[in-house]
Image: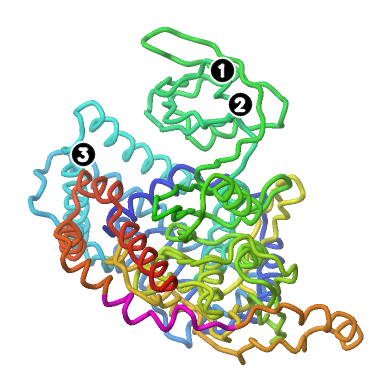
Amino acid sequence: MRRYLFIVVFLLQVAFGTTLPQINSNDVEDILGKMMEAHVSCKSFTAPLIKRIVNQFLENLDPNKTYFLKEDITSWHDIPLSRAEELQGQVVEGDYQTFFAIHEQMIHAIKRRERLEAKLQALPLPENVSIEEFKEIAWVESEEELLDRLQRIKALQMHAASKLDISVRDKALQRIEKKRLSREEELSAKDERLVFSNILKACASSFDAHTAYFTPAEATQFMIQVQQRLFGIGVQLRDNLDGFTVVKVIEGGPASATSLMKDDRIIAIDEEPVVGMEILDAVALIRGEAGSSVMITVLREEEVHEIEITRGEVVIQEARIDSQVIPFGDGVIAKIGLHAFYQDPQNSSASDLFQEIAKIKEEHKIKGLILDLRTNAGGVLPQAVAVTGLFITKGIVVSIKDNNGRVEHLRDIDGRTAYDGPLVVLTSKASASAAEIVAQTLQDYGRALVVGDEHTYGKGSFQTFTLDASNEGKVNPKGEFKVTRGRYYTVSGKSPQLVGVKPDIVIPGLYTAMELGEMHAKYALETDSIEENFHDNLSDIPAMQREQISWLYRYNLQPRVTTYQRHLEALAKNSKARIEQNKHYQKFLSTLEADEFSSEEMQLYVESDPQLHEAIHVTQDLIVFLKG
């Protein structure tokens, strides 16, 4: 399973590239100063931090250890603290010559790689190469060892490609080669903006696991991921070397109202040929101001078609929310998947969830509700409060402690709920950040039963992002950054940071065997706790305001209930028995343990979703127990 995750992440990184920011050394110094001022703990350059930054800079340049030899980087990799102190002084003064020297060494390594690639063409490929060989690798000692590593990587690629149709296989291998050559060309151009960008990336990621610097293109993509919306024509593309194939036309997007079809091959945009172009550059040509038009030239069954499309807002709705109903007794169990916490001028996760619940209520009697957060990696913090507020009356949802040690409580205050019946929250190791707030807060109040993987992701820190989403997504040409300002805590005073949310009942799923979560991240913050806040004394509110709102706020506060806890032992026992007796589920678990999914098996388990089915059984049991 882990290898599939790697492939997905790799493809995302390749797809969106890095348009260079307009920065110089003064900008680097300024941006780093702002990051440190805002960061929860990294307030100045120290020798240990400098050592970490230099190591990270090397790792970012050569993540797969296929360029540098060990001797190339002896002066920089894992340097002693005394040497780090020297570099510390340079960096504090805005002197980045060390990083330029490393970059120059990378250019020499690229030339060596070119020679080795030429040799590689004539060599036979080894057999029985395992991906496990590349889990924790070091830089090699000699050119011979480097050549052997390249052989083994190529053997892995060829083995994977051999499973594909021959025409697809050849294109896949060409694409790999194209991406390598493109990156080497960019690195060899000796553009100082690239070095400065990589310095900022190395520094940011060395502060902690979630602080990051974004090039302008990456910042734009980050906002799209957060909001699941953009201005363009509404298509998903695949780079096929001879153009860009339309993988999907997004329903409701501008392209869906035209003759553009799935499998059309885009060969020009506004009469500019795109064959051989980087996908990021092609996407930039397609995107534009709402209401403007773009001419797309496509090849369909060897016939050329020109299609004019008016750009507009594209909301990737299926990446936001979905629902289904499962008949049960004289009503239904509603399963609602919330895949992100988003907010834009028209929509938000809380309003969409409210409407989805209301719609199901109009058509059915809801006996129980499953809120599926398994693929929800977080998003906008206030939306975590608003979503939680749909299931509680009033009260503290999350507390945040910032870089100055100040604690602020975020509350739901409207006193109304969208649904107050039996509630199950389904989580996985991929449930993170805002998803963990919702799951743990509802668990803290006893309002929901949490089921799923043995823990969630464990991201209990919050970040601020310099790009203002309300400013029409205008990106600073110098780039943007997000920085970890502090940790968050649910009403119990616990932070999911590092440890995640523990379910009431463990139900294994697709992510169960993955090494996924904050505990596996570099430079993760430690977990922490504060006092519980079930009895909210409004201590963070100024005294005069506190007196004015106290009497109204305290009416109808969400109580801490134990209704589900009295049935927990029986629920867990029933669930365990069902899983043990289910042959399909047991085969699924053994395949997970062996980590040997074929793509067909993985698709089968995704479609059958035994984890969800067991969550439905648990919900059914809960409904029966509560009724009895």
Q: Which mark is residue 254?
A: 2
Which residue is situated farthest in the bottom direction here? 531
The answer to whether the residue labelled 1 contacts the one labelled 3, judged by CB atoms less than 8 Å apart, is no
Q: Which residue is mark 1?
A: 258
Residue name at image x 33 percent, y 55 percent: 6
Q: Nearer the viewer, residue 203 or 143?
A: 203
Residue name at image x 52 percent, y 15 percent: 259
Residue 251 versus residue 330 in the image, above or below: above
Q: Nearer the viewer, residue 593 or 309?
A: 593
For the C terminus, give its image quadrant: bottom left
For the N terminus, give its image quadrant: bottom left
SS at circle 3: helix
Q: Nearer the viewer, residue 571 or 506?
A: 571
SS at circle 2: helix
The answer to whether the residue labelled 2 contacts the one labelled 1, judged by CB atoms less than 8 Å apart, is yes
The crowding category of the residue bearing disc 2, from other C-alpha atoms within 10 Å (few below 14, some 14 to 19, many at least 20), is: many
Question: Alpha-carbon distance for marks 1 and 3?
Answer: 35 Å
SS at circle 1: loop
On whether residue 464 falls in the magenta region, the answer is no
Return the x and y of residue 273 as percentages of the image width and height.
51, 20
Question: Alpha-carbon distance for marks 2 and 1?
Answer: 7 Å
The stretch in magenta equals 560-573
Q: Which residue is mark 3?
A: 161
For the stretch drawn in magenta, the main secondary structure is helix
Can the viewer see residue 520 in this picture? yes
Asked whether, in this view, residue 243 is left or right of residue 131, the answer is right
Return the x and y of residue 411 as percentages of the image width and height.
71, 74
